[in-house]
Amino acid sequence: DRGSVQNSPKLYDVEYLMPVSLGTPSQQLNLDLDTGSSDLWVFSTLLKESMVNGQTLYNPNASTTSDKMEGYTWKITYGDQSYSSGDVYIDTVTIGDLTVSTQAVEAAKVVSEEFTADSDNDGLVGLGFGIINTVQPYKQKTFFEKAMPGLDSPVFTADLKAGAPGRYNFGYIDDDAYSGNITYVPVNSTDGFWRWVSPGFQVGSAGSFNSTRIHGIADTGTTLLLLPDSVCDAFYSQIASAEYEPSQGGYTFECGDPTVPDFYFGTANGQMIRIPGSYMSYSKTDTGSSRCFGGMQSDSGVGFTIWGDVALKAAFVVFDQGSEQLGWAEK
Ligand SMILES: O=C(CNCc1ccccc1)Nc1scc(-c2ccccc2)c1C(=O)NCc1ccccc1
C-alpha cells in the first residue's frame, strides 16, 4: 500500500499543512505533519469556544466509527511552551489515500493561546517515534507505525518547497522528486526523534568545509534551522548588516543585503545539501522594518540542533523507519 498528499506552506513557510480525513462520514481537517513529536491531536468539539478561532473541529460523536478510550488522556508541551491536552478516541484516519482504521485520535479539550491564534492549523500528525507519545496510561502508535506493516516500503518522504506546495509520500520513494543520489545516514531514535550526525558545514560556495560533527534532529514541525552558536557566528559574520539582537530574539540583517551566502551542510560520503541564502531571510522583524529575522538561529536552549523547515525545504528527505535511517537528496 502507499499514499501521497500535497502539503501547503503558510506565510513565510512558518508551517506546512496537509488535508487529513477522520471518522465516518469523513471530517476533513488541515494538519501539520510533525516529525519532531509523536501525538496525532486535533481541535475538537470538546474545546471551550474561547479556545477556538476558526479551526475545523473533529466531532467524535458525529463519527459512527469512533470509540472513546475511557480513562485515556494526553498532554503535550512543546519547546516554545505551547501546549495542548484532552481525551483519546480510536477512529479511522486517511492521509492521501492511505487509511489506518484504528488510529488513536487525540481530541483536544485544552489548547494554549498559540494554537488558538493559528486559525489555519487544526492539529498535528506527529511522525516521530511512538516512544514519546504522551497518551496515558498506555502510549499509542503514530499513524506511520500503524500503517507501516501494510506499506510497500517502511518509509515516508518529505518534499517541502519554499513558498510553494510540496508533497508527503508514504510507502515509496518517487524517483522523479529528486536529483542525483539519495545519501543515507544512521538515525538514533532513543529519544523519539529522527536524530542524526552531520559531519560539518560550509559557508558560501567559496568557503572551506568545517569538519565539526553536528548532532541534531530532522524536524518538519520546527520552522527555523537551529544550529550551534559557533556555526551561527561563522555564517552571520559573512553578512555585512547582520546583528545579534536579543530584543528581536536572535540574528537579524537588512532584508535586501546582497552578501547573504548559501549554507551547505554535510550528510555522508562527501555529499552536502545547499541551502540558498534566500531561505535565510525568514521574515520582516516588524511591519515596515527593513530588517529580516534570520532563518538560522542559535540552538542554545534546546541542547541539540534542529534541522527545521528552512533546511528541509532545500532537500528531498527520506524518513526510513524500517532501517532507522534518513535519506538526503538535492532536488
Ligand atoms: O516540538 C517540536 C516539533 N513540534 C513543533 C511544533 C509544531 C506545531 C506547534 C508547536 C510546536 N520540535 C522540537 S524538539 C525540541 C524543541 C525545542 C525548541 C526550543 C526549545 C526547546 C526545545 C522543539 C520545538 O519546540 N520546536 C518548535 C519551536 C518553536 C519555537 C522556537 C523553536 C522551536
Image (spheres, grey):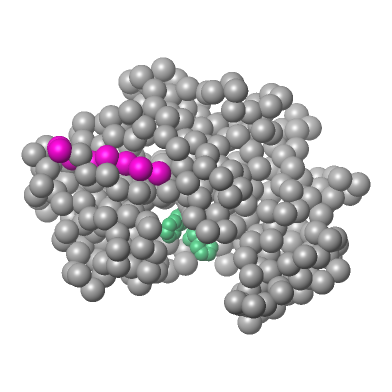
As drawn, is 170 to the left or to the right of 69? Answer: right
**Residue 127 position in % (x across, y down):** 41, 42
Residue in the image at 49% along x and 36% along y: 167
- Is residue 14 visible in the rendered structure shown here? no
Query: Most prominent secondary structure in the magenta stretch?
Result: strand
Q: Relative to 55, say whether 138 is above or below.
A: above
- Which residues are drawn in magenta? 18-25
Q: Is 328 part of what is drawn in magenta?
A: no
Q: Is residue 7 left or right of residue 278?
A: left
In this rendering, the answer to whether 1 lies above or below 262 is above
Res. 70 visible in picture: yes
Q: What residue is at 41 percent from the left and 17 percent from the top?
A: 152
Estimate the x, y position of residue 243 in percent, counting from the top left. 76, 74
**What residue appears at the point 84 percent right and 61 percent down from the top-left corner?**
258
Q: Give the percent coordinates (x, y) of residue 64.
A: 8, 39
Left or right: 184 in relation to 115: right
Query: In which quadrant is the C terminus drawn?
Result: top right
Q: Position of residue 212 (x, y in %)?
A: 77, 48
Q: Decide which of 311, 117 is in the foreground and name it.
A: 117
Whether residue 20 is in magenta: the answer is yes
Pick the residue in front: 75 or 123.
Answer: 123
Q: Residue at 16% x, 51% y: name it.
A: 59
